[in-house]
Amino acid sequence: MTKAGSPPTDSIKPPLWVNAEITYKCPLHCVFCYNPLNYAETFEKELSSAEWIKALRQARELGAVQLGISGGEPLMRDDVEEIVAEASNMGYYVNLLTSGIGLTEKRIAAFKAGGLDQIQLSFQDSTREMNDFLSSTKTFDLKLKVARLIKQYDYPMVLNVVLHRLNIDHIEQILQMAEEMQADHVELANSQYYAWALKNREHLMPSREQLEHAEAVCNQFRARLGNKMKLYFVVPDYYQDRPKACMNGWGTVFLNIAPDGLALPCHEARMLPGLDFPNLRDQDVRSIWYESEAFNAYRGDSWMKEPCRSCDEKDKDFGGCRCQAFMLTGDARNADPVCSKSPHHTLVTDQVALAQQPRLPDNQVRPLIIFRDDRNSRQFT
Ligand code: SF4
Ligand code: SF4
């Protein structure tokens, strides 16, 4: 049943892109991780292989074409090969998002045989020291080996580095590393401030000067390398005056499935109060997508408050991100405070002003950082 005021079922387009967060277990402890703070609660409730395959088949039958297999670290499960092969047979374009830990030659050969289309490998930095600090592991050398394996198995090299105050000044070395790895695509997205990154926001937000320098270096590499290495540089939305069109609109193209089977319109939505998110164990994808109250809650514009409701830009950004509106203002129906028209915009600009302060020495910052680990997660539960 659709909620009063939401668009009728026949105006809702099917999901195109499914993100399967098959586990929140991860050997890394990244300070900017976007997994929910209480991720450890899901460990005992993960969907089985058969439940994943059933859910993916239902989404494919609705029209989904792109599948991301992510986590946590998806390779912590030993059935990823089976899930990938089944999904590939269903006709999905399948992308594995991994830290590289656990990607042995045997496994990559199995992925190749099973039809995996793309592997996206994340690094935390170009230096062993900072990579290992930010993930609280010793994994830099292993990641370099995995990068070679990815090339050896004739996959495009898709490299992902989350940028922030602590690594953004290494931008030139990061891009040199990418070039040496013969990366085909490099995604340099600045940290967005959700979950663990929000906890560490004051230590992670770059200054304007840092951002301008990083963007200029990216442009130099772009000019020199052209299409040989495609570069995507995403600034933190706090530095914009209009919000991102989050997920291209709530419940329009993107379906996230959490490890415990919770179906979500975005990675972070679990935090929103007052919404009873449906579970794949209890409901099929079709009824979740078209009929659940949660997926209809922020479709259309009848839920909007001012200034979004009467704004002539609401078809461009849909009022921004519901999770960011809730996290910063306490009401998910408010305009995303990144917007300069929001009455709460100073919540964002105050943080940006703070980020212009001189950077503290590492030995003062590091003890204050909260790492994403199971013990901390259980404390946030
Ligand atoms: S961001 Fe880091 S800690 Fe979080 S899931 Fe990815 S690799 Fe693991
Ligand atoms: S007021 Fe709302 S709809 Fe208008 S630009 Fe800002 S966030 Fe977007």
Image (cartoon, rainbow, N blue to C red):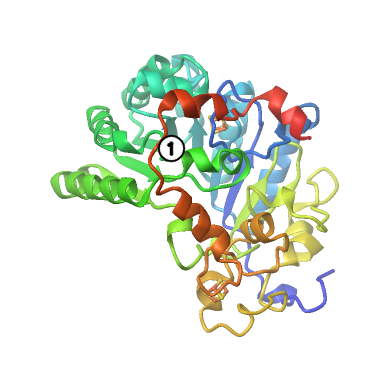
Q: Decide which of 111, 324 is in the foreground and name it.
A: 324
- Left or right: 220 with respect to 199? left
Quarter of the image that includes the C terminus? top right
Q: Relative to 72, does residue 136 appear above or below in the rendering?
A: above
The residue depicted at 61 percent of the width and 36 percent of the height is 86
Q: Is residue 359 left or right of residue 193?
A: left
Name the image quarter holding residue 15: bottom right
Question: Residue under circle 1?
Answer: 118
> Is residue 89 shown to the viewer in this render?
yes
Ligand 1: does it lie within 8 Å of the C-beta at label 1?
no
Q: Position of residue 221 (x, y in %)?
A: 19, 44
Q: Secondary structure at mark 1?
A: strand
- Residue 292 visible here: no
Residue 378 location, quadrant? top right
Q: Residue at x 54, y 43 (%)?
A: 201
Where is residue 77 shown, x and y percent of the image? 64, 23
204 vs 322, left or right, is: left
Measured as percent of width and height from the top left, residue 168 is found at: 35, 38
Q: Nearer the viewer, residue 89 or 355?
A: 355
Q: Residue furthest left?
A: 224
In the rendered view, tell whether residue 237 sits above or below residue 109. below
Give 98 or 234, whichever is nearer the viewer: 234
Across the whole image, how many numbered discs are drawn on residues?
A: 1
Label 1 crowd bin: few (<14), some (14–19), many (20+), radius 10 Å: many
Q: Is residue 288 left or right of residue 113?
A: right
At a point 70% along the width and 63% down the height, the residue shown is: 332
The N terminus sits in image quarter? bottom right
Image quarter for ligand 2: bottom right
Residue at the (70%, 75%) spot, across then down = 10
Viewer-closest of 168 and 115: 168
- Say which amino acid is labelled 1: Gln
